[in-house]
Image (cartoon, rainbow, N blue to C red):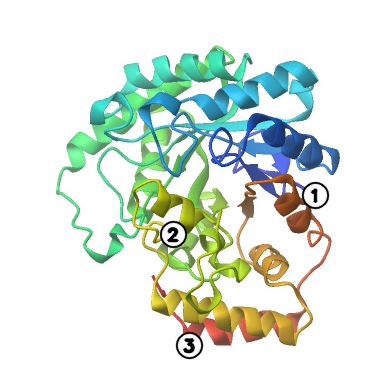
Amino acid sequence: MKRVKLGRSEVEVSEICLGTMTFGNQTDEADAHAQMDRAAGIGMTFFDTAEMYPVNPVRRETVGLTEEIVGRWLAQQGNRDRVEIATKITGPSQTVRDGAPYDGATVRACIDASLRRLQTDRIDLYQLHWPVRGTWAFRQNWTYAPEPDKDRVLDHMADVLDAVGQAVSEGKVRAFGLSNETAWGLTRWCDVAERTGGPRVASIQNEYSLLYRLFDTDLCETAVQEDVTLLAFSPLAAGLLTGKYAGGAMPDGSRAAVDKQTGGMGKLGGRLTGRAIAASDAFGRLAADHGWDPVHMAVAWQLTRPFRNVPIIGATDRHQLDHLIAGLDRSLPADLVKSIDRLHRDHPLPY
């Protein structure tokens, strides 16, 4: 598998990343370890996790469990030098730290806690799961209203970068990344790092898929000009692009079904709309017309984008991962890429 550098850092990762957010909930530990074995076996050595995982749902009693599962795999395999581990500190959340925002002191404590759970001496990429000041991610773009508090935000950034910089100097962290950030936020993090000598942003982990292309404008330009790599989460639009919800279906064991069974709305975090189903069905037909599996088309399309981009794929079980892997050696032909762009104009931002 090809290798990609994260921004201007020295961290090099596989061009596809395995996400772990279901490990410990929908995915039991044995299957999680089997998935990591399978991924590492084909050169997919980059694994992304977070202190708040597993999700769907997030529960206080399971916070940190996914890191522990990854940590036990690392300890058993003894292959720490052959894989890259990314994790994240949770933004303000009632499930973690009772909604308290993170500052430099919190970051230092959380890095140490993640290192213990992961049973390692270093984190290859340490990310801020979402900003303290809020974000338009997670369908909040429809009502997002930023507050005019620039001085406080810049002071906060300097404090956090000082903490991450200390961890870098101690060898605990190799590179620094953001997640669910805005173009303004990304630019300011870069500016503050330059002014203070703190660690520079190497990556930004934001949602990006055939159905969700908010990254394509201001954020894309910012990432290209600042040399920041996109880690694209939810490239299958939380399963919509697999075709499993075609025509409004909700299969047993699917993410939407599990969410509904555990007290949620069953709407895939606001993604499951009539327009999204129509768009997913249209992309499914397009894939079939060109002889492609829709899952393989959705992931391969990510690698055609005009910016450095590492898709994060996820699977609830080993069979799903095998299906994803089966299409990773194919490249999209130019005519199909053009057809995708035309179809996007017919189905813009369906959720």
* Residue 110 rendering spot, x and y as whole percentages: 42, 19
User: What amino acid does circle 1 point to?
Assistant: Lys
Neighbours of disc 3 within 10 Å: few (<14), some (14-19), many (20+): few
Which residue is found at the position 39% from the left and 22% from the top? 107
Query: Quick one: SS at disc 1?
Result: loop
Picture disc at residue 2: 1
Q: Is residue 323 above or below residue 28?
A: below
User: What amino acid does circle 3 point to?
Assistant: Asp
Question: In which image quadrant can residue 75 be found?
Answer: top right
Is tag 3's residue or tag 2's residue first in the polypeptide sequence?
Answer: 2
User: What amino acid does circle 2 point to?
Assistant: Leu
Which residue is found at the position 20% from the left and 43% from the top? 150
Q: Nearer the viewer, mark 3 or mark 2?
A: 3
Cβ atoms at labels 3 and 2 below 8 Å apart: no
Query: Quick one: SS at disc 2?
Result: helix
Label 2, on which residue?
A: 219
Is tag 3's residue or tag 1's residue first in the polypeptide sequence?
Answer: 1
Using the rendered image of the protein, determine whether residue 290 is visible from the camera's viewpoint. yes
Give the CA distance from mark 3 to mark 2: 22 Å
Cβ atoms at labels 3 and 1 below 8 Å apart: no
* Residue 43 rendering spot, x and y as whole percentages: 82, 42
Q: Nearer the viewer, mark 3 or mark 1?
A: 3
Query: Quick one: SS at disc 3?
Result: helix
How many numbered discs? 3
Give the CA distance from mark 2 to mark 1: 25 Å
Which residue is found at the position 66% from the left and 84% from the top? 286
Q: Nearer the viewer, mark 2 or mark 1?
A: 1
Question: In which image quadrant can residue 101 be found?
Answer: top left
Label 3, on which residue?
A: 346
Which residue is found at the position 80% from the left and 49% from the top? 2
Neighbours of disc 2 within 10 Å: few (<14), some (14-19), many (20+): many
